[in-house]
Image (cartoon, rainbow, N blue to C red):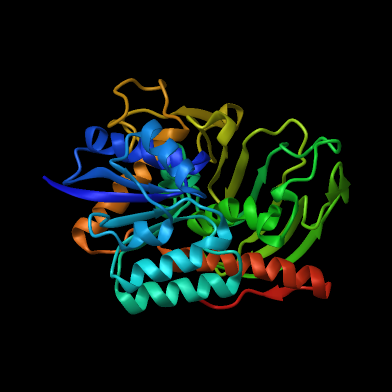
């Protein structure tokens, strides 16, 4: 096995998740490349040093530029704010280094397009972080749909709903300022990605974007609280997606239902180790959705646990992402989802905004 030096930019929520993942991935999946937590960068040298001690990195960087340029950092994970993604990725690709970037790809569609161009010009390995689509249950749902188990798909309903800003008395923060931090920029990409993964390309959308709580203690809210869209997929199916950060009672409402001519599947991330499957066969009196508990027979479950129904968790999704990134680096072959897949998500998000502004259907730019 060969060691590879990992540099992570950002040490907060996702930075910690990636640090834990790279510390564990070799033991879970017995990867050919074994990560070495080489360097961490954060908003200040003091913060980076704090994360170095907490997460087990060999060194702390003065800034992200020093991390990217360091010869012992051989692969880069971007877990910093969206507005920093483009500059970091472009600098890394200029040196030919592989890059894993947290979603969304950039703070704007222009950022996302530039990042794809830089990755492809460099010929460097690139991946984007959509972790929820990697649960064993959702991987299995994707497999069932692709194999035609539920027949020809006719309809998709999805939502990403949380309630972290449901209380109107919560103060204004960075989350309530700027399009990139609003619901379409922050939460919507996960469910758009799920829709694309399960159903294929989206061709057009009818979108609405709304700020419900326009002021909060400490300031004005300048981005969106919730949004919805009707859509049409390239395969002809209809769809509806809803996104909200003010959905009272929802903690991790990453939920989808897919209807086909022979059956249907449904999933709720708040119960991530169960998939519900309906098959239109057998006696009518015995038909109904049945719960499938994930276990070793489902994708990427067994490396974590030998017991059916025991379950995997959030951190395990990030470990699966780390495995995929390491495999892409080792093989030199792209692993889904790449930056171009992230660009497809950004283009749907842009179409939602365009539809809302124009008051009608908007075509999704072809990728």
Q: Locate residue 304: give its quadrant.
A: top left
Instruction: Name the residue: 52% across, 70% down.
Output: 112
Instruction: Name the residue: 42% across, 57% down.
Output: 64
Instruction: Name the residue: 57% across, 75% down.
Output: 110
49 displayed left or right of 247: left
Residue 367 appears at what percent x and percent y? 50, 76
Task: Give the vertical position of 362 relative to 99 (above or below).
Answer: below
Task: Give the vertical position of 28 relative to 116 (above or below).
Answer: above
249 displayed left or right of 156: right
Residue 258 appears at what percent x and percent y? 58, 48
Residue 207 appears at what percent x and percent y? 76, 64
Is residue 288 at least partly visible in the picture?
no
* The N terminus sits in image quarter: top left
- In front: 132, or 89? 89
Q: Locate residue 338: give its quadrant.
A: bottom left
Task: Give the vertical position of 204 relative to 263 (above or below).
Answer: below
Is residue 282 at least partly visible in the picture?
yes
280 displayed left or right of 212: left
40 displayed left or right of 251: left
- In front: 333, or 43? 43
Q: Please state the total of marks drawn on the protein image.
A: 0
Instruction: Name the residue: 53% across, 59% down.
Output: 196
- In front: 364, or 24? 24
List the single residue furthest toward the left.
Answer: 1
Residue 36 appears at what percent x and percent y? 24, 43
């Amino acid at each position: 096995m060969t060691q590879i030096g990992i540099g992570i930019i950002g040490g907060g929520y996702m930075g910690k998740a990636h640090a834990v993942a790279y510390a564990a991935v070799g033991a879970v999946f017995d990867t050919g490349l074994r990560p070495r937590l080489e360097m961490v960068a954060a908003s200040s040298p003091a913060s980076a040093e704090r994360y170095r001690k907490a997460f087990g990195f060999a060194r702390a960087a003065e800034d992200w530029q020093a991390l990217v340029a360091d010869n012992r950092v051989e692969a880069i994970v971007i877990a910093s704010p969206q507005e920093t993604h483009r500059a970091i990725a472009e600098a890394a690709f200029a040196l030919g280094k592989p890059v894993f970037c947290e979603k969304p790809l950039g703070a704007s569609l222009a950022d996302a397009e530039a990042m794809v161009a830089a990755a492809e010009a460099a010929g460097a390995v690139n991946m984007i972080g959509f972790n929820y689509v990697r649960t064993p249950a959702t991987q299995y749902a994707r497999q069932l749909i692709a194999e035609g188990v539920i027949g020809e798909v006719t309809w998709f309903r999805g939502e990403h709903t949380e309630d972290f800003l449901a209380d109107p008395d919560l103060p204004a923060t960075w989350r309530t300022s700027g399009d990139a931090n609003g619901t379409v920029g922050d939460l919507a990409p996960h469910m758009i990605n799920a829709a694309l993964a399960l159903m294929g390309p989206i061709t057009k959308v009818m979108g609405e974007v709304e700020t419900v709580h326009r002021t909060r203690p400490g300031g004005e809210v300048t981005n969106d609280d919730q949004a919805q869209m009707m859509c049409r997929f390239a395969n002809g199916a209809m769809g509806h997606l809803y996104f909200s950060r003010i959905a009272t009672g929802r903690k991790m409402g990453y939920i989808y239902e897919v209807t086909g001519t022979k059956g249907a599947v449904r999933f709720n991330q708040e119960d991530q180790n169960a998939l519900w499957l309906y098959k239109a066969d057998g006696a009518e009196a015995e038909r109904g959705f049945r719960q499938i508990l994930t276990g070793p027979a489902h994708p990427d479950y067994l490396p974590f646990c030998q017991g059916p129904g025991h379950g995997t968790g959030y951190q395990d999704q990030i470990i699966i992402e780390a495995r995929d990134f390491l495999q892409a680096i080792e093989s030199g072959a792209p692993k889904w989802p790449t930056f171009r897949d992230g660009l497809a998500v950004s283009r749907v998000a842009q179409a939602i905004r365009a539809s809302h502004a124009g008051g009608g259907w908007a075509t999704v730019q072809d990728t």
